[in-house]
Amino acid sequence: MLSFILRRILIAIPTILLISVFVFSLQKLLPGDPVLAMAGEERDPEVLEFLREKYRLNDPIPVQYMTWVGNALRGDLGISLRTNQPVTELIAEKLPVTIQLAVMAILFALVIGIPAGILSAVKKGTVTDYVANIVALSGLSIPNFWLGIMLILLVSVKLDLLPASGYVPLSEDPVKSITTMLMPAFVLGTALAATLMRHTRSAMLGVLKSDYVRTARAKGLHERRVVLKHAFRNALTPIVTLTALLFGELIAGAVLTEQIFTIPGFGKLVVDAVFNRDYAVVQGIVLVTAVGFIFMNLLADVAYVLLNPRLRTA
């Protein structure tokens, strides 16, 4: 197992380096000058030159890249051009908020999507199957921002059941923090649940046709045990992969939902950084997100080995 993980880490290292090149290069192609945005309306030439020297923007691009990578390897992602705050501090402040939202959303997706997928596969061709597929397609088709606005109008404005927006840290008030996150997590979770339902259904349909499932039924085992212990366990591999990728996608892509519900997470941070031409913050966020995706893939690979005994022997 240890050698397997080490091989995956060795594969990940050149991937991260390639991503860092793309992140840095594409950032330089964005229109606008961050120094002009920082200098204000007067834009004194001396001030502009001082800022460019301070943030080493006059250095050749390869030198800037090597400096940025070297600092990143030491845990220094630079200084925000707007707030003069270390990027690592900004990320450490905002990342737990988005992680909490992502965890709650993925829990909604798992609780809704996997049982619906199993039920749809077992009841293939029945009314239950058609209803589950219609609901899944609806979840994939409805935009998150529209669903979020409708839930705010119904649940918060009309029924006054949950807060419409804002965020309370878990350390301050766990109950209020969870209630504040319920609606945005549900909005994100419904779309993911639809995706999980479709993949779970497809995986289960393939497994339910297997010889060992027919053998288990021929032995007289209870149908619930056949479905959950024999079929679902062997259908978990693609579901684990998808769940890991969806979790990484949530961390990177909850921008609209965080904006609608005024959640001060990764999404709001990256939107503000892009509009303010805060290159250091954008680069740091994209790099951390990419590393997070790679880490989630590594966890999925480890889960494969744990779930499939044949891979352990191989």
Image (cartoon, rainbow, N blue to C red):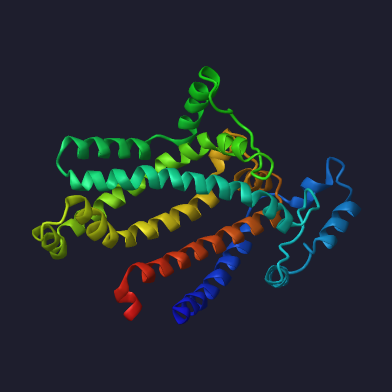
Give the percent coordinates (x, y) of residue 229: 26, 58
* Quadrant into which the C terminus falls: bottom left
Q: Splitting the image into 4 quarters, where does residue 115 fall?
A: top left
- Tell me what residue is drawn at x 45 percent, y 48 percent: 106
Q: Is residue 285 left or right of residue 40?
A: left
User: What is the x, y in percent for residue 247?
Assistant: 48, 53
Q: Is residue 306 left or right of residue 253?
A: left
* Residue in the image at 12% along x and 57% along y: 217
Residue at x 79%, y 48% (from the top left corner): 83
Q: Is residue 314 visible?
A: no
Q: Residue at x 51, y 75 (%)?
A: 9
Q: How many marks?
A: 0
User: Is 178 or 55 nearer to us in this picture?
Assistant: 178
Q: Quadrant of the N terminus?
A: bottom left
User: Can see residue 101?
Assistant: yes
Coordinates of residue 163 in the picture (x, y in percent): 59, 28
Question: In the image, 68: left or right of 132?
Answer: right
| Residue in the foreground of this view, choosing between 19 and 53 | 19
Quarter where residue 133 is shown? top left
